[in-house]
Amino acid sequence: MQPIVKVFEDNHIDAPWSHVFVFALDAVLFLVIAFCVREIRRARRAAVEADAVIKPKAPLFEGARFVAGTVELAQGESDAVRVTITQDGSEQADKNNHKTHTWVEKEREIRARPFYLRHDTGARVRVEPPEDVLLVDTLDQKEWLHPTRRKLRAELLPGERVVVEGRLHKAPDPEGIGETAGYREAATMGWMMKPSPQKGMHISTESLSRRHELRARAFFWTCVWVVFLGFVMNVPLATYRARVFLGENVVATLLGKRTYETSNGKGKKTVHRAVDVRYESPPGTARFGGLVEIDEDDGMDLPPGVKGEIWLRRVPRFPAATALGQGSSVWFHAWCVAAVIAGIAVYRAYRTHIYRRWYEGRVQEKGQGPLPPQTNERFLADDPTAFAAREKRGLARAARAAKHVEPIPMD
């Protein structure tokens, strides 16, 4: 008895390798979604923990890691902590003369001076930040050097509410005067915040939970996008899914093998090998038939004039998904499209994972159109008007934004 012919269509990945290839894409999407969910849960848990560690009216104690209070300048100091970033700008244009511009960080300067925190209990804590202090603030000051170079600045201002992470201990306070000893005055012991040996010092003008909340939000929307891309990925795989879940293996009639040539506009000829197949169910009612192109190797293996029976994966509810073969094959080009979509999902999650705000990495901004025109904006420290109105800088950041300062959204 002549065996039933088993061949698959041209450019199809044969079963069971088709299942392996498609399962790999499904696994990638599942792992990306699981990763996003894990990061969301971690970030939300970190936000809750960050809010819990700050108890504004709790008494200070030796070894405390966090202290919250209002900024006061130390005697003889005009500032506390400031970070100045120098950026160079450039323009780019495509072939249609559509312009875009980019600002890239070239230099970062940190100036850190001792200052005080007025704790809610009334205690005064001296903070001595290191030169590598991490300031979590807004780059809300700008100064132009020339049209393609500018400086951005984040500055800790008197009256601002901040949280300092470091290590609290008792130490002589230079501004705390105690008992006199002869003609000298001795400094009294006071609270002092210094960098932690392991984590250094962080100073934040926003709540400690803010960065974690932003990360959770970013991963939430990334997860939504990945789920959406998962649905899109399955569009080119729809016929394969139909063959797997709705298909059945049936035996069709093989009427013969055909070989034909086609040529493109340049005269290049391509040899095609196909089989003539017919399937009737019930008998006398054609359900599937015609020439079906097969892989070159399968075509070479079939002897000339072959006839008999051939395996067919029939999908009654989705006739377009019916294909040659015993088991479910997947069209290679459709799989490649799905793989690209899965790659986009992975890249989106990766970009969200490595994203850093300005104080965690280099500042690089992109915008549409040419570089913006140079303005007369100046830093607050260089503006006499700003110095005269220094008391107003204790207001909320949104309320004290001066007209000459253009807030720069970096979130």
Image (tube, rainbow, N blue to C red):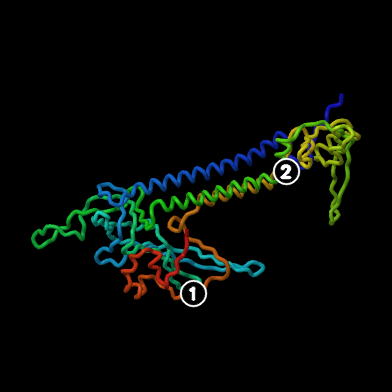
SS at badge 2: helix
Q: What residue type is labelled 2?
A: Phe
- Which of these two is toward me, 52 or 113? 52
Q: What residue type is labelled 1?
A: Gln
Give the residue drawn at x 52%, y 49%: 220
Q: Residue at x 66, y 68 (%)?
A: 96
**Does 384 sit above or below residue 291?**
below
Number of on-image labels: 2
User: If you read the primary sequence from the N terminus, does the residue marked by circle 1 or circle 2 appear first?
Assistant: 2
105 with respect to 177 (left or right):
right
Q: Quadrant of the N terminus?
A: top right
Residue 335: x percent and y percent?
69, 44
Name the spot of residue 201 as percent of width and height, x first.
Answer: 34, 53
Query: Label 2 belongs to which residue?
Result: 332
C-alpha distance separating marks 1 and 2: 54 Å
Position of residue 158 relative to residue 318, above or below, is below
> What residue sits 32% from the left and 74% below the top?
388
Name the outermost residue toward the left: 182
Residue occupied by mark 1: 374
On the image, the x and y values in percent for residue 378 come to: 41, 73
Density class for disc 1 (Cα within 10 Å; few <14, some 14-19, many ≥20) is some
What residue is shown at x 31% (from left), y 69% (from top)? 391
Find residue 269 and report its horizontal and vertical position in percent: 85, 50
Q: Is mark 1 on a helix, strand or loop?
A: loop
Q: Is residue 166 left or right of residue 294?
A: left
Mark 2 residue crowding within 10 angstroms, few (<14) / some (14–19) / many (20+): some
